[in-house]
Image (tube, rainbow, N blue to C red):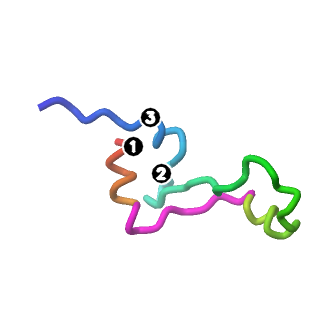
Amino acid sequence: MPKMKSVKGAVKRFKVKKSGKIKRGTAYRSHILSKVDGKHHRQMRSPKHVDKADAKNIKEMIN
């Protein structure tokens, strides 16, 4: 049986760290950020981690 192809959109959006956790970017950061207060805008810069419930599916998409 042939190998599964990885989902290219997922490969571009997620990175697997050494610990096995999956890093992702924050959503809602593209435009119209003048309405967002400074604290929230600053917090959105930091990377986030994928929830355990979604991690298995994302790992299958990446590998």
Q: What is the x, y in percent for residue 2?
A: 17, 29
Q: Range of the magenta residues?
A: 45-54
Residue drawn at the location 50% of the way across and 54% of the way down:
17
Decide which of tag 3 and tag 2 comes sooner along the chain: 3
Element class at badge 2: strand
Which label sits on residue 16? 2
> Which three-letter amino acid code belongs to the residue tagged 2?
Val
Q: What is the x, y in percent for residue 63?
A: 34, 42
Cα distance between the residues tagged 3 and 2: 15 Å
Q: What is the x, y in percent for residue 12?
A: 53, 39
How packed mark 3 is, by other alpha carbons closer than 10 Å (few <14, some 14-19, many 20 or more), is few
Which label sits on residue 8? 3
Cα distance between the residues tagged 2 and 1: 9 Å
Q: What is the x, y in percent for residue 24?
A: 57, 54
On the picture, is 41 further left or further right than 26? right
Decide which of tag 2 and tag 1 comes sooner along the chain: 2
Frontmost residue, 17 versus 8: 8
